[in-house]
Image (spheres, helix red, strand yellow):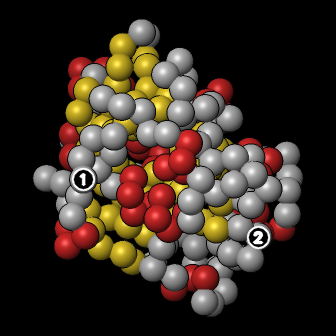
């Protein structure tokens, strides 16, 4: 499987978010590959996007977003959950794509041991669930997703046709003003 190149990420985050559907997110736990096909993403684009972490400018927390695309942006939220994002666009234009859900493909026994007694259909169907299942933490923040030596990367896998991908407003941004609250920047596909 080929790792996605830097050129894949140094684009409009909406294109990156759409094109990540069908790609395979891979991490390593105790020397073993754990992976899943990405089936839900959300795009966040720059300081003008009032739902984006960059809306207030560069901070210690979001500094990774200001780098060149193809790097992991992993942050902690609600005092308990890690969220995994791919930085998009060129340097100094903060943008990222939140990976919201995956369908597990490799390391199923490892995921099961982490997630039991939860039903398999709910192991990775949310952004905090997938990071827990793949062992993604703040230690992965800033990892180069384009390097085969990275502890986390994304591989080319499936090409999902447009008719199987739905675009909707982003989730969990209830206090974001319009038009940002209703932008159809969430992409989802049923890969069952």
Nearer to us of marks 2 and 1 is: 1
- Seen from the viewer's position, the closer of residues 118 and 138 is 138
Q: Quadrant of residue 54?
A: bottom right
Q: Quadrant of residue 25?
A: top left
Report the number of discs: 2
Q: Which residue position is annotated with label 2?
A: 47
Q: In the figure, 153 relative to 47: above or below?
A: above
Q: Residue furthest top?
A: 31
- Seen from the viewer's position, the closer of residues 14 and 176 is 14
Q: In the figure, 60 relative to 117: above or below?
A: below
Label 2: state its secondary structure: loop
At horizontal 65% and vertical 72% (from top left) the residue drawn is 51
Q: Quadrant of residue 17?
A: bottom left
Spot occupied by residue 149 in the image (x, y as percentages of width and height): 53, 18
Residue 188 in view (yes/no)? yes
Spot occupied by residue 40 in the image (x, y as percentages of width and height): 36, 58
Q: Residue furthest bottom?
A: 178
**Left or right of residue 152: residue 39:** left
Mark 2 or mark 1: which comes first in sequence? 2
At horizontal 50% and vertical 68% (from top left) the residue drawn is 14
Specify the label residue 169 is tagged with: none
- Seen from the viewer's position, the closer of residues 22 and 127 is 22
At horizontal 63% and vertical 48% (from top left) the residue drawn is 69
Q: Which residue position is annotated with label 1?
A: 159
Spot occupied by residue 121 in the image (x, y as percentages of width and height): 21, 46
Q: In the figure, 181 relative to 92: above or below?
A: below
Label 1: state its secondary structure: loop
At horizontal 38% and vertical 57% (from top left) the residue drawn is 19
**Left or right of residue 147: residue 130:** left
Q: Dot 2: within a 10 Å radius of its alpha carbon, few (fewer than 14), some, or many (20 or more) residues? A: some
């Amino acid at each position: 499987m080929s790792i996605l190149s830097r050129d894949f990420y140094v684009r409009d985050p909406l294109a990156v978010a759409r094109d990540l559907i069908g790609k395979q997110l891979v991490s390593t736990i105790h020397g073993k590959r754990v992976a899943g096909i990405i089936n839900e993403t959300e795009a966040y684009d720059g300081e003008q996007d009032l739902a984006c972490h960059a809306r207030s400018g560069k901070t210690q927390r979001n500094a990774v977003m200001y780098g060149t695309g193809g790097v992991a942006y992993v942050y902690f939220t609600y005092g308990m959950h890690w969220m995994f994002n791919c930085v998009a666009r060129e340097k100094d234009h903060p943008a990222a794509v939140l990976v919201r859900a995956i369908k597990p493909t490799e390391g199923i026994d490892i995921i099961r041991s982490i997630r039991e007694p939860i039903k398999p259909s709910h192991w990775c169907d949310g952004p905090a669930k997938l990071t827990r299942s793949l062992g993604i933490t703040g230690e992965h923040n800033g990892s180069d997703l384009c390097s085969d030596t990275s502890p986390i990367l994304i591989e080319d896998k499936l090409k999902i046709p447009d008719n199987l991908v739905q675009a909707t407003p982003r989730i969990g941004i209830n206090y974001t003003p319009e038009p940002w609250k209703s932008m159809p920047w969430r992409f989802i596909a049923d890969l069952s």
